[in-house]
Image: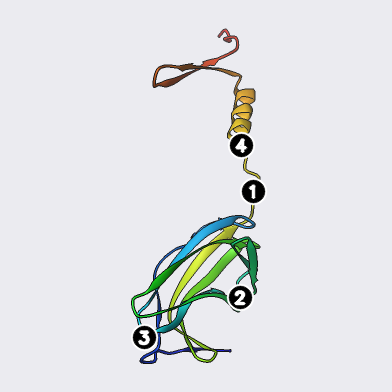
Amino acid sequence: MTIKLAGENGNPRGKIQDYNFPDKGVAGVEYSFSIVVQNIGGEGVYGCGVVNAIGNPGLIKIIFEDREIIIDQGKYLRSSKVGAYGTGFTISRKILFSVPGTYTIPLWGMYLVPPDSWHYDQETVLSIVITEASEEKTTWERFREFFESNKVLVVVGLGSAVVTGVALRVGRRKKD
């Protein structure tokens, strides 16, 4: 299979109309993304590719329909459809980045020239910053730490549609 950058008359042409990708995230966490692709050429097979560019810090995992596909550096995952001019489709998947770092993710608008030559005539390049997973504390854990370190008594009253809170300092006042 070969991939070429070209636009040939009469062939289908996959154009990325819209996309929704995270621009930042945490390593090992799944994020949803979607891509809308439209055929702006002749009838045939068109689609899009999600590329894990060479030089990225790690692998990319795409999750859909209870399947997980690992994309190595320099490889891509293609989604395609047969259709006439003006037809389109949307892909919705989840993506997971294996390690922290800045990932360059090209999105390709593509089409097939039979028998097996894929061409891309559109490229949109995304930059996604992935950070190290941190141990995020729950709201309750943060509240408990605050309470223990400040010796504060919190009283909460519930009204018909209003929640009010009062914080009282517990302790003795020092004499000057």
Q: Mark 1 to mark 2: distance in Å? A: 25 Å
Among numbered discs 2 and 4, the one appearing first in the sequence: 2
Among numbered discs 3 and 4, the one appearing first in the sequence: 3
- x, y percentage for residue 112? 48, 86
Q: Mark 3 to mark 4: distance in Å? A: 54 Å
Taking depth in this image into account, of 75 and 141 the one nearest to the observer is 75
Q: Which mark is residue 138?
A: 4
The residue that label 1 is drawn on is 134
Taking depth in this image into account, of 14 and 30 the one nearest to the observer is 14
Q: Comparing marks 4 and 1, which lies closer to the viewer? A: 4
Residue 53 visible within the image: no
Q: Comparing marks 2 and 4, which lies closer to the viewer? A: 4
Q: Comparing marks 3 and 4, which lies closer to the viewer? A: 3
The residue that label 3 is drawn on is 42
The residue that label 2 is drawn on is 55
Q: Which mark is residue 159?
A: none
Q: Residue at x 50, y 67 (%)?
A: 127
Amino acid type, callout 4: Thr
**As displayed, is residue 147 above or below residue 123?**
above
Amino acid type, callout 3: Gly
Q: Mark 2 to mark 4: distance in Å? A: 36 Å
- x, y percentage for residue 172? 60, 9
Q: Mark 4 to mark 1: distance in Å? A: 12 Å
Amino acid type, callout 2: Gly
Quarter-of-image position of residue 154: top right
Among numbered discs 1 and 3, the one appearing first in the sequence: 3
CB under 8 Å between discs 4 and 1: no
